[in-house]
Amino acid sequence: MNRATQIAIPTLVRLKPGALDRLGLYLSRAGHRRIAMLFSHGLVPELRERAKQSFADHGIELVQENEVIDASFEHATQRFGEIDRQVQAIVGLGGGKALDVAKYAAFLGRLPYYAVPTSLSNDGFCSPQSSLTLQGRRKSLAAAIPYGVVLDTEVCRNAPTVLTLSGVGDLMAKLTAVFDWKLAFEHTGELVNDFAALLSDNTVSAFLARESLDAEGLELLGTALMFNGIAMEICGSSRPASGSEHLISHALDLHSSRPRLHGLQVGVATYLMSLLQQNQSDRIAQVFAKTGFWDAIADDPFIRAEWLHAVSIAPTIKQPFFTILSIRDQLPEVERLLHTDPVLLRCFRD
């Protein structure tokens, strides 16, 4: 007899201006008084100092701090091996690479993990996986949902706009990902967790209520991306957040002469796949237009030939993983769209 799903969720969630300056207070309340902090290479020094001042103000001992150079399995295991036995929790501060390495090191050490993102470039900060390279190839490795998510919306608002637009692209991908998931059920019988699919869809709807990158819009975006991570925890896979659009992005990471931000690649691929799926493409295009996503892509267009190659190999990236690209050879239709769709014409060059 099947039982109801049981999941882990963050105990602490703070999404508001000034949250970074209260990080020490949150740690103190939880009884995590000796910590290790892993931070991004190139992180604005002021943000690191604000975190450390917060620790000092609330009696938190920073046992060790390490800079994260790259998001590799080898680097993450090295950082895990360096963790002092006195450490009671691990804090990841910065962008996706630092958070993925910190999350995985905490998972290996069975330690509480606090995610403190300084931008909203993707949904990885609250996912149950770490995106790491293993022998040069990117893998999604099992990890654990953060104990705490501390997201300072003012810090994220001051991050480069392109990082926030990347987060918008990653969020809108949930529409095509859930479509692919349901398509897989129809064609292969792969089970769909209805609650995870509903939650993923609703994260997009919540952001669409604002469609802005002001303070309120960033709070909605951060909340939506966080719930995408919870949706993955619910079903035990990336299905509610990742479909054909992510396969294309992974293929670009492997073969493009200049891979771009994850969410920028995923966002364009989301619109492209929505055209194949006949699934809310006008809605997606409108959100990208209103937020400035299309303008950012047009300022630095992708290479059309690289995308055609990425689409051709995307179905081989992850198997078995049924998507719209699995039904038939979609390359001729994709090529036609890249040369004729008025929105996509701005996004590509020869």
Image (cartoon, rainbow, N blue to C red):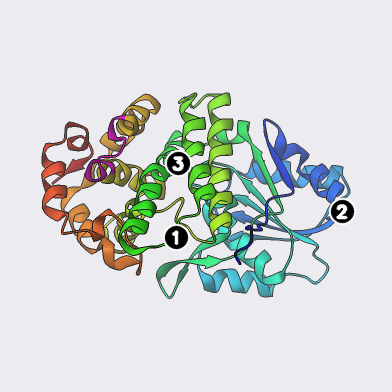
Q: Where is residue 278 shown, x and y percent of the image?
A: 25, 40
As helix, strand or loop, the secondary structure at mark 1 comes to loop
The residue lying toward the viewer, choosing from 4 and 10, is 4
Identify the mark at residue 31; answer none if there is no mark. 2
Give whichever of discs 2 and 1 has the lower sequence position: 2
As helix, strand or loop, the secondary structure at mark 3 comes to helix
Residue 98 makes an appearance in the image: no
Residue at numbered disc 3: 171
Which is in the foreground here, disc 1 or disc 3? Answer: 1
Q: Where is residue 266 shown, x and y percent of the image?
A: 36, 47
Magenta range? 274-282
Report crowding for label 1: few under 14, some 14 to 19, many 20 or more residues within 10 A (C-alpha): few
Which is in the foreground here, disc 3 or disc 2? Answer: 3
Q: Amino acid at mark 2?
A: Gly
Quadrant location of the N terminus in the rendered image: bottom right
Q: Amino acid at mark 1?
A: Leu
Q: Where is residue 113 shown, x and y percent of the image?
A: 70, 57
Q: Amino acid at mark 3?
A: Leu
Residue 253 within the magenta-colored segment of the rendering: no
In contact (CB < 8 Å): disc 1 and disc 3 = no
Residue 346 makes an appearance in the image: yes
